[in-house]
Amino acid sequence: MRVMSWNVQGLGGPLYRRYKYRLRQEINKCIVGGSLNFLLIQEHHLNTFRISRYGSILSGNWDMFWSPAIGNTEVRGGVCMAISQRWIPSIIQKQVIIPGRAQYVIMQEGEIIWGLLNIYAPNTASARQQFWKELLDNLPPLDHWCIAGDFNMLEDPIDRMGGSSTTIHGHELAMWEQLVFSLQMLDAWHAPSMVHTNTSLLFSRSDRRLTGTDLSFLDRFYLAGKFLSSTSTIHIMLGTTCSDHALVILLVSTQNLKKFSNMKILENMLLDNYSFSLQVTELWSQKDIV
C-alpha cells in the first residue's frame, strides 16, 4: 500500500494556475511510477462551489473525498483524500471529524479493519490541544490506524533546523500523548524498522521567506505497529513551486495486520483462578503491544 501526503497550499490560486501542469505531472508520476493507492491533500483552499466545478484532479477511477475549506470567506484549510480503484470496494465508512481539518476512511478486507486519517492541524498550541482531544473523542476504536498529514508541531528537536527549537509541550503534550497511547501509534520516520529511501532530504517543509533556513518535518505519518515490517519505507520528495511542503510517501503492507480481541479484566475476577488465567494468556498472546 502506497500513501502520499502533501500540503499543496492551495489548488485554485494564481500560483496553482501558473504551475498546474507541473503539479499534475508530479502527482501522476507518483501514481503511475509508484502505484499510488491513496493521495492525502491538506490546505487545498477550495470551497464547496469550487470543488463541484473542480472535479477530480487525477486521471482514472478515483474516489475523491473532499472536506471544503473553512472560515468566513471559505479559503482556509481544507482536506481531501483520493482513493484508488483498488481500495474503493474495501471502504466501509467515510467521515469528516473536523470540517476542513480532519477526515478518515475505514477499510475492511476479510476480518481485518483499519483506518486512514488525514489531518491538517491548527498552527497554535491551544487550538491543537483541542484538536487532539476531538480526534481522541471521535475516532472509532480500531486496532490499526494510519494517521498522516500536516501536524504543525514537532515531538523531536532533530526534526527542526533553524528557527525556534521549541517542540510540543505543556497541556498540548498531555493531550497528544493520550491520543498516541490510545491508538498505539508511533512516528513512522523514527521507527527503527522503517527504511528511509532518501536520506539527503530530511525535512518536509522549508520557509522560503527565510531563504530556506527554517526547515522542519511537519508532514508525517503515525502508524500502528503492525503496519511496520522489513519492507516498510518512507520517502520525502521535492515538491513543486506551488508549495513549500515536500511530498511524503509511505509504503507499508496490510498483510501483517490481524484481528485482535479486546481484553477487559473485571475487578471481581482473580488471577489465581486457573481457567481465567488461561483466558488471559490466550488474549494477551493475540494483543499487539507497541
Image (spheres, grey):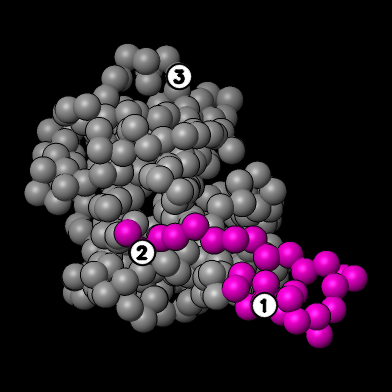
- Circle 2: element type: loop
Residue 258 lies within the magenta run = yes
Distance from label 2 to label 3 (Cα)? 38 Å
| Res 176 quadrant in image | bottom right
Which residue has dot 2 on it?
256
Which residue has dot 1 on it?
278
Residue 284 or residue 203, whichever sits in front: 284
Which residue has dot 3 on it?
48
Residue 180, position as x, y percentages in the image: 58, 65
Of label 2 and label 1, which has the lower sequence position? 2
Evaluate if marks 1 and 3 touch, with contact meaning CB atoms under 8 Å apart: no
Label 3, residues with CA under 10 Å away: few <14, some 14-19, many ≥20: some
Report whether 163 appears left or right of 275.
left
Residue 6, position as x, y percentages in the image: 32, 48
Report whether 25 appears left or right of 231.
left
Distance from label 2 to label 1 (Cα)? 25 Å
- Circle 3: element type: helix
Give the residue type at disc 3.
Thr
Give the residue type at disc 1.
Leu
Mark whose residue sits in front, 2 or 1: 1
Q: Is residue 25 above or below residue 172?
A: above
Distance from label 1 to label 3 (Cα)? 55 Å
Of label 1 and label 3, which has the lower sequence position? 3
Report whether 216 appears left or right of 165.
left
Residue 286 or residue 6, whichever sits in front: 286
Q: Which residues make up the magenta segment? A: 255-283
